Image (tube, rainbow, N blue to C red):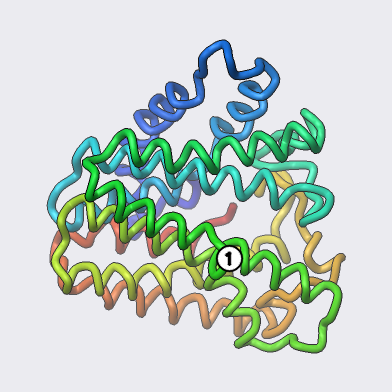
Amino acid sequence: MTNTSVSNRPFHDFAQTHRPALDEVLSKYSTYSQDCPAELQEAIRHSLLAPGKRLRPLLVLMAADACGSLSEDAKVAACAVEMIHTYSLIHDDLPAMDDDDMRRGRPSCHAKFGEATAILAGDALLAQAFQTLADGLPAKMAARCCSILGFAAGPAALVGGQVADLAFERDQSEGNVEFLQAIHRRKTGALFLASLQMGGIIADGSDEQMESLETYGKKLGLAFQITDDLLDWQGTSQSMGKRVQKDREKGKLTFPGLLGVDESRSQAAALIAGSIEALAVFGDRAVRLESLANYVLERNR
């Protein structure tokens, strides 16, 4: 983790404790039988096990912890979320999409293994995420989590947001804040929200707790995207682990491009403040989620 301060230390410590175990389980999930072609397994592991922040799986664990029960079931859902996230990154990096040749400090999947294998690696992870939930959780819990994750990854959320993002590159007449927020509520925020919801479900969170997690997740997801846009606008490829300023070069709709750097920072700060306020119901158990919110605002990669 970077930018470790007093405000984000609880999140940093939680990540340091739980990320190695998540990586170990992800490694087991991505070790397949001999029926899986060696190149496909290598491509999946190249992307799934690449060094990353693991924010979405950590959100599952922290939501379960805030609701009072951090169980092994939460790790199952956390790994499923990371599979969906990695699939989305593999496909987003493709030349037909965002056309990125670097991801998490290493060649993107298609740059190393070719477009066809990258597409199939993403397809495999998308399918495996739901198998992971179905096989690893009690039936009713698995059904609820599959529904939540399926919506977050589907046409009205992640995929729909990506289509809207690509459509703007062809027709820039709809460039306004509401349109941009709608893109990222689906493209980025939906998976943040799904992670929190699954963690709450696994810990049998109350209606009040689930409502709090929803408000927190929506605000956190949008703030994360604003800071991501700012880092792409001002950051370096070395610090980010991927090519930067590409959105500006392609004329994509971004928060600093639309609002300016100072107003974007102001909006991110307001969203983070609102996300932290939403956690009041959890009392002292909110400390890690609050710390994560501060990390999102302060991060430099």
At x 64% / y 84%, what residue is drawn? 179
- The amino acid beneath tag 1 is Pro
Q: Is residue 179 left or right of residue 290?
A: right
Q: Is residue 155 above or below residue 36?
A: below
Residue 7: quadrant of the picture: bottom left
Q: Residues within 10 Å of mark 1 (few under 14, many from 20)?
A: some
Q: Please say if 104 is above or below 8.
A: above
Disc 1 on helix, strand or loop? loop
Q: Is residue 134 left or right of residue 224?
A: left
| Quarter residue 90 falls in | top right
In this orientation, does residue 9 appear? no
From where the camera sits, is residue 5 visible?
A: yes
| Rendered view: 37 above or below 244 | above
Query: Residue 77: percent from the left, percent from the top?
Result: 34, 44
Residue 188, compared with residue 70, is above or below; it is: below
Q: Which residue is mark 1?
A: 155
Q: Is residue 9 left or right of residue 223?
A: left
Residue 214 x/y as whole percent: 33, 71
Residue 162: percent from the left, percent from the top?
A: 67, 64
Between 33 and 51, the one nearer to me in the picture: 33
Residue at image location 38% in from the left, 68% down from the top? 217
- Judge by depth and name the residue closer to the eye, 258 or 6: 258
Q: Residue at horizontal 37%, vertical 43%?
A: 78
Q: Position of residue 181 (x, y in %)?
A: 58, 79
